[in-house]
Image (spheres, rainbow, N blue to C red):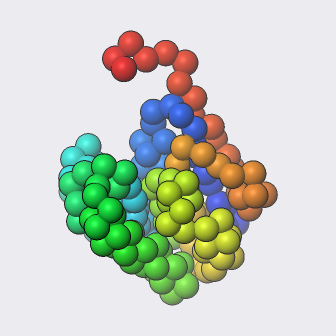
């Protein structure tokens, strides 16, 4: 079995999710089972709905119910959505604990730290659950220094030019 890897794509640039999806497509083409859990994308992250066509090779899960981004919700909506997000994070724990896949991508999971939905210790515990999988991929804007030591590969995606924004 190949060595287990924790990989992080982070930074202010565009393309973190796309880079993670590239890892998924590569793994699926090698016959590995892949699960992607997306956080903070809202219910209608249409840009990645095409991934649903790649099932059962790549399974995509979103636990959020609201169409808007978490930050744009009313406090009462945030409370409910927070529980949905935690359900997704707990599902990730279960996936790792039971060895359900070879590659697990937690898209925008690092953003949950900034919003104080989960703690750094929660992610460290998740990494330490590593079972029978080859790769755990984490994405988000910021990578806390405390997590860097737990990653095997860290890629910072920066923005040099954006004529569209």
**Residue 90 or 50: which is nearer the viewer?**
90
The quadrant of the image that shows the C terminus is top left
Task: Judge from the rendering whether residue 19 lies leftward or rightward of residue 42; answer left or right.
Answer: right
Residue appearing at x 43%, y 17% in the figure: 162
Q: Position of residue 44 (x, y in %)?
A: 21, 52
- Residue 15 falls in image quadrant: top left
Q: Position of residue 138 (x, y in %)?
A: 55, 56
Task: Judge from the rendering whether residue 159 lies leftward or rightward of residue 129; answer left or right.
Answer: left
Residue appearing at x 65%, y 65% in the figure: 120
Task: Judge from the rendering whether residue 88 lies leftward or rightward of residue 11; answer left or right.
Answer: left
Residue appearing at x 46%, y 79% in the figure: 90
**Relative to 153, residue 52 above or below:** below
Residue appearing at x 37%, y 75% in the figure: 83
The quadrant of the image that shows the N terminus is bottom right
**Residue 139 or 121: which is nearer the viewer?**
121
Q: Position of residue 121 (x, y in %)?
A: 67, 71
* Residue 103 can be seen in this image: no
Residue farthest toward the top in the current orientation of the protein:
163
Task: Judge from the rendering whether residue 12 lies leftward or rightward of residue 143; answer left or right.
Answer: left
């Amino acid at each position: 079995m190949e060595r287990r890897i924790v990989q992080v794509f982070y930074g202010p640039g565009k393309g973190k999710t796309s880079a993670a999806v590239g890892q998924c497509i590569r793994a699926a083409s090698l016959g590995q089972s892949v699960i992607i859990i997306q956080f903070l994308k809202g219910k209608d992250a249409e840009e990645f709905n095409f991934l649903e066509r790649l099932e059962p090779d790549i399974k995509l899960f979103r636990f959020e119910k609201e169409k808007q981004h978490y930050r744009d919700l009313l406090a009462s909506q945030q409370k409910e959505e927070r529980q949905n997000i935690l359900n997704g994070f707990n599902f990730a724990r279960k996936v790792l604990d039971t060895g359900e896949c070879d590659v697990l991508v937690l898209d925008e999971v690092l953003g949950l730290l900034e919003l104080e939905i989960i703690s750094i210790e929660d992610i460290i515990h998740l990494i330490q659950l590593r079972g029978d999988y080859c790769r755990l991929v984490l994405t988000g804007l910021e990578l806390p220094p405390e997590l860097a030591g737990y990653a095997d590969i860290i890629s910072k995606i920066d923005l040099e030019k954006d004529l569209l924004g």
